[in-house]
Image: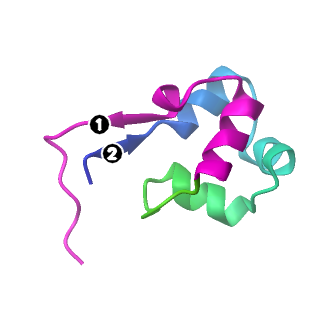
Amino acid sequence: MAIIVRLDEMIWARRMTLTDLSERVGVTLANLSILKTGKARAMRFSTLDAICRALECQPGDLLTHDPDVTAPEN
């Protein structure tokens, strides 16, 4: 997929763990892990909002687009 999730970089920059973010946002650690690894197929705007609030960032800080990246075939 051409959408790149930069969650790992953002939590590292904030000196936070995925567990810390999970507790602050109210999203399971498993779901954040799926998002972090780029395996998520969708994200609710309410989840994106909660993550941005917890990390004090903008959606564009978390998500980038690279048209040269292709999704692995299933």
Q: Is residue 2 magenta?
A: no
Look at the picture and state if 66 lies above or below 70.
above
Q: Residues within 10 Å of mark 2 (few under 14, many from 20)?
A: some
Magenta stretch, residue numbers: 45-74
Going by the numbered disc 1, the residue's amino acid type is His
- Residue 46 lies left or right of residue 36; in this view the side is right
Which of 9 and 46 lies nearest the eye of the viewer? 46
Describe the element under mark 2 as helix, strand or loop. strand
Number of other residues with Cα within 10 Å of mark 1, as a class: few under 14, some 14 to 19, many 20 or more: few
Q: Residue at x 66, y 51 (%)?
A: 47
Q: Left or right: where does residue 74 sit relative to residue 41?
A: left
Q: Amino acid at mark 2?
A: Ile
Q: Which circle marks residue 73 in the picture?
A: none
Q: Residue beneath label 2, please?
A: 3
Report the number of numbered marks. Answer: 2
In the displayed structure, 59 sits above or below 57; it is below
Residue at the farthest front position: 45
Left or right: residue 13 compared with residue 37: right
Numbered disc 1: secondary structure: strand
Question: Residue 21 at x, y = what percent?
Answer: 77, 43
Residue 26 % position (x, y): 82, 55
**In this picture, is 50 found above or below 73?**
above
State the quadrant of the C terminus: bottom left
Residue at (46%, 28%) from the top-left corner? 60
Horizontal and vertical percent position of residue 51: 68, 40
Task: Classify residue 11 by image quadrant.
Answer: top right
66 in magenta: yes
Question: Where residue 65 is drawn, which disc sits there?
Answer: 1
Quarter holding the N terminus? bottom left
Query: Marks 2 and 1: in contact by CB < 8 Å?
Result: yes
Determine the residue positioned at 60% across, 57% down: 33
